[in-house]
Image (cartoon, helix red, strand yellow):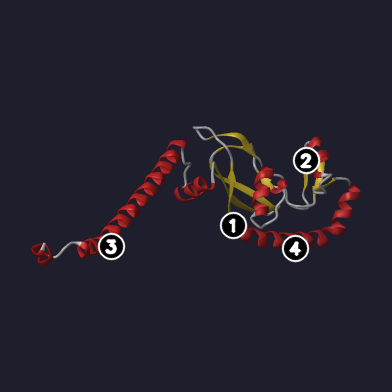
Amino acid sequence: MDVILLERIEKLGQMGEVVKVKPGFARNYLLPQRKALRATKENLAFFETQRGQLEADNLKRRGEAESVAEKLDGLSVTLIRQAGEGGQLYGSVTARDVATAVTEAGIRVERRQIELEKAIKMLGLHPVKVRLHPEVAVTVTANVARSEEEAEAQAETGHVVSAEEQREAEEALVEAVIAEVEADEEVAEATENESAGPAEDAEAPSEEEEQKV
């Protein structure tokens, strides 16, 4: 089926081009989304009368998208999920999940703007493209981790924190807390002994008193 593109479609063509597409793609996506018109003589004539307005509208939308892209650039969103020893998620992270996380971060995007070929099923840092406009896209990072602490570690190191590393980190933290408590107890005990020392000396009988006795 031949259609007239009303906006740029990646890997398909620019606004105003007449391109051949599969009928299903046209009926299920391009036509209902008003991204294209059937390439009839009447529609071609209509497009030419509307070209100026369509191009102006496109420039306005692109400018708005570029403004949002500047805010999204470099954004990383954390998604907490349960996972097995090897980092395999008990479930998955979908385009909807990423859109929700980005929106909660303060920049509203829709699920259809998230270009995720397949759901994320592993822990780690995953680049995800956000298509804000046919000519504007930006990449955000989905930081998928078991906990906020693990997400912070992944962001710092750039790689997945394994379950073993997580356990080692937790054990090291416990040991550090125990060591700190023991050190505090030693300081308290030393302070107590220093305070008790002069008092005991004051109570002890002097040499002269011992001779009198």
Cα distance in 3D space between marks 4 and 2: 28 Å
Q: Residues within 10 Å of mark 1 (few under 14, many from 20)?
A: few
Q: Nearer the viewer, mark 1 or mark 4?
A: 1
Cα distance in 3D space between marks 2 and 1: 35 Å
Q: Is residue 13 visible?
A: no
Q: What is the three-letter code of the residue carrying label 3?
A: Ser
**Contact, mark 3 vs mark 2 (Cβ under 8 Å):** no
Q: What is the three-letter code of the residue carrying label 1?
A: Asp
- Where residue 195 is drawn, which disc sits there? 3
Q: What is the three-letter code of the residue carrying label 2?
A: Lys
Residue 57 rendering spot, x and y as whole percentages: 79, 61
User: In the visual, does 127 lie left or right of 175?
Assistant: right
Q: Nearer the viewer, mark 3 or mark 2?
A: 3
Q: Nearer the viewer, mark 3 or mark 4?
A: 3
Q: In the structure shown, which secondary structural element does the residue marked by tag 2 occupy?
A: strand
| Residue that numbered label 2 is attached to | 20
Q: What is the three-letter code of the residue carrying label 4?
A: Lys
Which badge, 1 or 4, comes first in the chain's sequence? 4
| Residue that numbered label 1 is attached to | 73
Q: Nearer the viewer, residue 81 or 75?
A: 81
Q: In the structure shown, which secondary structural element does the residue marked by tag 4 occupy?
A: helix
Which badge, 3 or 4, comes first in the chain's sequence? 4
Cα distance in 3D space between marks 3 and 4: 78 Å
Residue 6 rendering spot, x and y as whole percentages: 80, 52
**Contact, mark 2 vs mark 1 (Cβ under 8 Å):** no
Residue 88 rendering spot, x and y as whole percentages: 55, 33
Point out the image quarter for the N terminus.
top right
- Where residue 60 is drawn, which disc sits there? 4
Tell me what residue is drawn at x 88 percent, y 53 percent.
Answer: 45
